[in-house]
Image: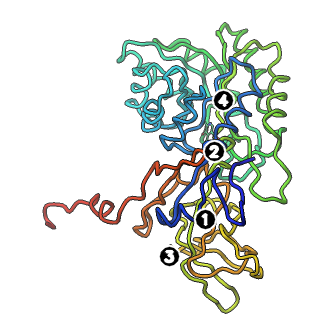
Amino acid sequence: MNHFEFRHGRLFAEDVDLVALADKIGTPFYCYSTATLERHYRVFASAFPPDTLIAYSVKANGNLAVLNTLARLGCGADVVSGGELKKALAAGIPAGKIVFSGVGKTGAELELGIRAGIHQFNVESEPELEALSKAARAAGATAPVAIRVNPDVDARTHAKISTGMAETKFGIPWKRAREAYARAAALPRLKVVGVDVHIGSQITELEPFEEAFARAAELIAQLRADGHDIARADLGGGLGVPYRAQDPEPPDPKAYGEMIARLTRGLNVSLILEPGRLIAANAGILVSRVIYVKQGDEKRFAVIDAGMNDLLRPALYGAHHAIVCVAPRPQDDTETYDVVGPVCETSDIFGTYDLPQLRSGDLVAVLTVGAYGAAMASAYNARTPAAEVLVNGDRWSVVRPKMSDDEFLGLDRLPPWLE
Ligand SMILES: *Cc1c(COP(=O)(O)O)cnc(C)c1O
């Protein structure tokens, strides 16, 4: 469910006409819908008990305006770097609602989190426990710790976004978890508070979650028997969204919430959830203009002004995103196009689409790109990432401008011997 729809034959973002917006600010740009973000947050949050911390995964879309929109609803944050931590705080998310995940937190990042007074560190290795204890001593504070356990379950998603199998780098193998908790309890300035699992992203069935959460529940009982005070279960993110109309609908937040309620019944833990994609994906589109339509030997190409530097998912994961014409001409026939970007890589292709006949200058919108879209953008080919716009009713605002070529060029420095 989102708030991008056709009115009088052209695509609107809430009450904003995207043809007019594109004429005003130029293309390409990401366009996010406030109403959609808010709706997704509310639907998700309402599937869980009121004391649940919804820690939105900042890496999905860390735009300050997006974070601020969610912060106002009471949303927390899951961050994976010092930079994301600073963004979440700057967006008004209180430290007490921030959890810090990631396999490679540096001593400086850990100390930043401790000094800010964040809710929880999700620790991913024994050496990180040592580093956290050290950072806590340096800051003269105590660090609340959950250990991310790797439950060794197959999330049945794309291999590159599967994180809960034994061969991935994430978490501490669940068989070694009790030892790690014993170590955490013995280290100065650490306070064990919970257990954390996150098995991957774009998961479209409940079974892998069930398997992982059942293991976490079992572990919580064992850890309590070992004398640890486990008050929280952080069950990560990962619930998928539909990218293709013909795909089976992924489980909805309500079904996911009911499954979690069943598995955690009687455990007496407060829950933390870290949704990213589910909140942001469907709340964003990428608006782009056709530069050329070109006829190849075997294929017809629509070359658009957004590329893999703006949206990496197709090239990185073979991901599919639907594309629509923003203002289709009703009399035009449908034709088949390979929609491609301008970047000099064969993998700079969105896919093959049947679209109303395209001409140079036409606008298209790539759908469901609010998560892992702008967040993964780069300036490859010296193409600075697309602007980002947030819409709210009939209002819109550029919440991240496209960097000019001159600003981008100005980031490079010549060494003294070349000046
Ligand atoms: C990426 C990530 C998430 C969010 O995953 P989604 O699939 O976007 O919900 C949550 N927790 C951790 C630790 C992550 O790395």
Q: Is mark 2 within 8 Å of ligand 1?
A: yes
Give the alpha-carbon distance from disc 2 to disc 3, as whole Å.
29 Å
Classify mark 4: residues with Cα within 10 Å, few (<14), some (14-19) or many (20+). many
Q: Is mark 4 within 8 Å of ligand 1?
A: no
Write down the residue under mark 4: 149
Residues at marks 2 and 3 touching, judged by CB atoms closer than 8 Å: no
Q: Nearer the viewer, mark 2 or mark 3?
A: 2
Q: Name the quarter showing ligand 1.
A: top right
Residue found 58% across the figure and 63% down from its top = 287
Residues at marks 4 and 3 touching, judged by CB atoms closer than 8 Å: no
Write down the residue under mark 1: 315
Q: In the drawing, what numbered circle is on residue 248?
A: none
Write down the residue under mark 2: 280
Judged left or right of residue 72, residue 220 is right
Write down the residue under mark 3: 344
Colour scheme shown: rainbow
Q: Residue furthest top?
A: 227
Q: Is residue 305 above or below residue 115?
A: below
> Looking at the picture, which amino acid does disc 3 mark?
Cys
Give the alpha-carbon distance from disc 1 to disc 3, as whole Å.
13 Å
Residue 234 on image: x %, y %: 66, 26
Classify mark 2: residues with Cα within 10 Å, few (<14), some (14-19) or many (20+). many
> Looking at the picture, which amino acid does disc 1 mark?
Ala
